[in-house]
Amino acid sequence: MRWFRKEKPRDIWDEAIEWPLGDIEAAERIRDICRSAADSADFVGGRAVSADGRKRGAERTHEEENARYQRAGKAAMEIAMKVSDELMRDAAVKDIVEFCLRANDTRTSRILFRAIQTPSIRDGMLADHPTLKQ
């Protein structure tokens, strides 16, 4: 039967961008990348635990999930660098910082947090995540 030999679906960040993205489309794509790789970030951060206390996705290896998290983060950061509107870029970087925090990647999240220039976004992030202050 043919459906047993299906290829593994590609991740959203592995898909090629066929046209120049506008700022709104880029921010939306970054948000989609962060949401679709959230399970990998949770796995890497050690928070992927089911209701019965067992680790979800035991069949997945830490190396595979870490590589998936790294690829997603890199793709999101590359798109964020091309956003020209400061407010849209800061909102997109906020999504990436929260994505990094899910994986307990405090080093990267602090570096990216310093790139946020909009005071309201910075203050909201500091209120939610006081560890970024250091």
Image (cartoon, rainbow, N blue to C red):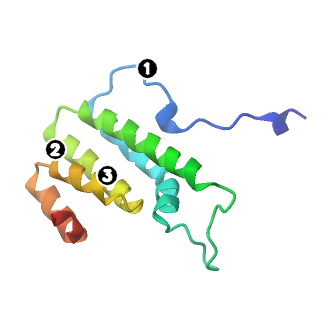
Kindly identify which numbered label has been placed on residue 18.
Answer: 1
CA gap between label 3 and label 2 equals 13 Å
Q: Secondary structure at mark 2?
A: helix
Q: Amino acid at mark 1?
A: Glu
Q: Amino acid at mark 3?
A: Asp
The reply to whether the C-beta atoms of the residues labelled 1 and 2 are less than 8 Å apart is: no
Q: Which residue shows up at 47% across the image and 36% down it?
A: 13
Q: Secondary structure at mark 3?
A: helix
Q: Which residue shows up at 49% across the image and 59% down it?
A: 44
Q: Which residue shows up at 49% across the image and 68% down it?
A: 47
Splitting the image into 4 quarters, where does residue 134 fall? bottom left
> Of the residues under marks 3 and 1, which one precedes in the sequence?
1
Q: Amino acid at mark 2?
A: Leu
CA gap between label 1 and label 2 equals 25 Å
Q: Secondary structure at mark 1?
A: loop
> Of the residues under marks 3 and 2, which one precedes in the sequence?
2
Kindly identify which numbered label has been placed on residue 134.
Answer: none
Q: Residue furthest right?
A: 1
Please name whichever residue, 54 or 3, is drawn nearer the observer in this view of the structure: 54
**Rendering coords of residue 9 (x, y %):** 64, 37
Does 106 sit above or below residue 16?
below
**Considering the image in quadrants, where does the N terminus appear?**
top right
Q: What residue is shown with label 3? A: 95
Crowd rating for badge 1 (residues with CA inside 10 Å; few <14, some 14–19, many 20+):
few
Q: What residue is shown with label 2? A: 87
**Rendering coords of residue 130 (x, y %):** 20, 70
Q: Horizontal placement of 99 versus 2: left or right?
A: left
CA gap between label 3 and label 1 equals 23 Å
**Comparing labels 3 and 2, the label whose residue is closer to the camera:** 3
Crowd rating for badge 3 (residues with CA inside 10 Å; few <14, some 14–19, many 20+):
many
